[in-house]
Image (cartoon, rainbow, N blue to C red):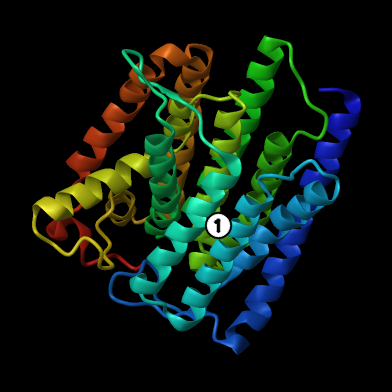
Amino acid sequence: MGAIDVMFLFIVSLSSFALVAVLSAGVIRYGPRFGLLDTPVARSAHVAPKPLGGGAALAAPYFLCVIWFVASAAISESALAYLGCLFIVVLGFSDDRWQLSSKVRLPVQFIVSLAAVRAIGVDSVDFGFFSLSEPLTLSLLAVLSLVWLCNLTNFMDGIDGIAASQLLVTSLSCVVLLVGLDAAAGESGEHDVVLTLSVVLAASAAGFLLWNWSPASLFMGDAGSGFIGFALGLLALESLVTQRMAVWSWVLLLGVFIADTAVTLLVRIIRGERWYEGHSQHAYQILSRRLNSHPRVVGGVILINICWLLPLAWVAGILPHYGVLFATIGLAPLLLGCYRLGAGRADAGEAPIQLN
């Protein structure tokens, strides 16, 4: 990257941070007047009502950047995918305000995800011993992945700062991988779309964490959690189609959220529970109650991402043919750890200790 690119990214990141911080303060002050208030229930990790809807503030710089890219023709064929991301935010915001049924949310998520995959496209996936390249199968997997990411981040947004911290670390890790792998390949791109949006997302997450770190003054709601999942999914699709990152690198970068959600849902299904109902049985929720701390859990997640998953994602990018092996190495201890913590079990997941 040249000096102009670095200055551009610095200005974009600083502007994104400031905009989200200011908008979040506005949501805290005025959101409750419009019914944007999270009232705690039995499974909640807080006792006092908190302003909701911070996801709209979190997403604002991202869409301003997308508009700039569309106007400059840097985004053309994939513009529909980013419009779909806006629909996801509106859907989540509506759910925050009016509590939409899953019968409304899921069909919209599938339709929007299908449109996004058609706009961006898909690329083959190397499993090491074989390569999956059938377009229809790949498209179906991509649609399911986008819908899954929207809901996965929603499931994992249950304690202060965890979803925003994951967005921050994942986006920064994406920047590290893109810059490093591009440099190794002798490539660079002025005002690169994926790199720039990653920087914007990281800075926006940092601005939001000013208000969302424990004890949180503002929650992002479904508007924010759905946006995080879908926006990261679009970055993954864009980077895969251009063959700049391997799918297994993305699996590793999102490894903590994937492992916790997978184990929790699988155990609940096996135990015959209604897996689709709200609960507080995720491993991170159980651990936050045992430690009586949100920051310690979030700090642990950040360390796992930086010290364990990011290095493996780097190696998976350098050696994509062995990516599935490195993904297995990275996720296996996380899956085991979630299971040992009691993820998905009612006896381990209920009766929360209220922290704030």
Question: Number of labelled discs?
Answer: 1
Q: Is residue 44 above or below residue 324?
A: below
Q: Position of residue 202 (x, y in %)?
A: 65, 44
Taking depth in this image into account, of 23 and 127 the one nearest to the observer is 127
Q: Position of residue 213 (x, y in %)?
A: 55, 57
Left or right, 45 with reference to 60: left
Helix, strand, or loop for circle 1?
helix
Q: Is residue 131 above or below residue 234?
A: above
* Mark 1: amino acid: Phe
Taking depth in this image into account, of 244 and 9 the one nearest to the observer is 244
Instruction: Point out the residue furthest to the bottom here.
Output: 33
Q: Which residue is mark 1?
A: 227
Q: Is residue 47 above or below residue 267?
A: below
Q: Quadrant of residue 272?
A: bottom left
Residue 164 seen anywhere in this rendered image of the structure: no
Left or right, 333 with reference to 95: left
Left or right, 90 with reference to 324: right
Q: Quadrant of residue 289?
A: bottom left
Q: Position of residue 302 (x, y in %)?
A: 49, 38
The quarter in which the C terminus is drawn is: bottom left
The quarter in which the N terminus is drawn is: top right
For the point 25% across and 41% down, the residue is: 338
Give the crowd class for mark 1: few <14, some 14-19, many >=20 residues within 10 Å. Answer: many
Q: Quadrant of residue 196?
A: top right
For the point 26% across and 65% down, the residue is: 279
For the point 75% across and 65% down, the residue is: 22
Q: Is residue 327 above or below residue 228?
A: above
Q: Position of residue 26 (x, y in %)?
A: 71, 74
Residue 307 seen anywhere in this rendered image of the structure: yes
